[in-house]
Amino acid sequence: SGTTTTALHYVAANASGNHKFYTAGIASSNLRMTIAANGNTTLTPSSASLGNLIVATSTGGLSGVSVGIGTITAPTYGIDILSNDPFVAGVRTTLYTAGNAPAWITRNSRGSIASPTTLLDNDVIGAFAFLGNKNTTPTFAYGGYFSCEVDGVPSTNIPSRFVFKTSTAAGAALVEAMRINAAQNVGIQTGATITAKLHLGAGTATASTSPEKYTAGAL
């Protein structure tokens, strides 16, 4: 049963309670989407290389368009997952091929989709933020953050640095703990000024705040 058009065929509530959508005729090779009785939805590509799921506006981009998984209200981010299950709230990628590895790629540009422009020195290229429940309003607060930032003037390549931040005390803002700059020098509590391959921030003679400490004993 169901309705039929020349391009799309819809079979509603078959014997298994599934809703099925076909293109170019009702045949197993033309099945494109199945909505099971329990609500699970399966997309079936026409070949191993075809079957993209595209969510976008008519002019391109995702302004105001988001995907929510388990969210009760409208999602806040492009992809917003809400769950009591750690596996459902996680993201897993698996790649089967030789000589390659799964990659998490973020891209950033100034300008717009129609007219992108070059990033500038100190722009953030991408970042990961870690927030935890602190039981007060607002409920979630930053516990850690690391970012990749432009560290110079982009030309053929983009000079970059990694910056790691931590929260030092309840209610405190994130504080930079370490950075690796474009010269591949490492600074710990130095800020932007790194003058050696390994540069430690100033401390005191007290053991707990000394910039360097060694513990005696066998390894």
Image (tube, helix red, strand yellow):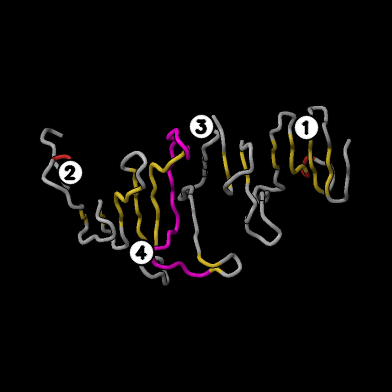
Q: Secondary structure at mark 4?
A: loop
In the image: residue 102, left or right of residue 28 = left
The type of residue carrying mark 4 is: Asp
Q: Does label 4 or label 3 sit earlier along the sequence?
A: 3
The residue under the point 35% across, 59% down is 161
Number of numbered labels in the structure image: 4
Tell me the quarter of the picture where residue 148 sits: bottom left
Q: Does label 2 or label 1 sit earlier along the sequence?
A: 1
* x then y, percent, for residue 102: 48, 47
Q: Which residues are magenta?
A: 117-139
Q: Does label 3 or label 1 sit earlier along the sequence?
A: 1
Q: Within 10 angstroms of label 4, few (less than 14), some, or many (20 or more) residues?
A: many
**Mark number displayed over residue 86:** 3
Q: How far apart, in angstroms, are the residues tagged by discs 4 and 3?
A: 36 Å
Q: Secondary structure at mark 1?
A: loop
> Which mark's residue is nearer the viewer, 2 or 3?
2
According to the picture, the residue beneath numbered tag 2 turns out to be 209
Q: How far apart, in angstroms, are the residues tagged by discs 4 and 2?
A: 29 Å
Q: Nearer the viewer, residue 200 or 97?
A: 200
Name the quarter where the C terminus is drawn: top left
Tell me the quarter of the picture where residue 34 sits: top right
> Which mark's residue is nearer the viewer, 3 or 1?
3
Whether residue 187 appears in magenta in the rendering, the answer is no
Q: Secondary structure at mark 3?
A: loop
**Mark number displayed over residue 118:** none
Q: How far apart, in angstroms, are the residues tagged by discs 4 and 1?
A: 54 Å
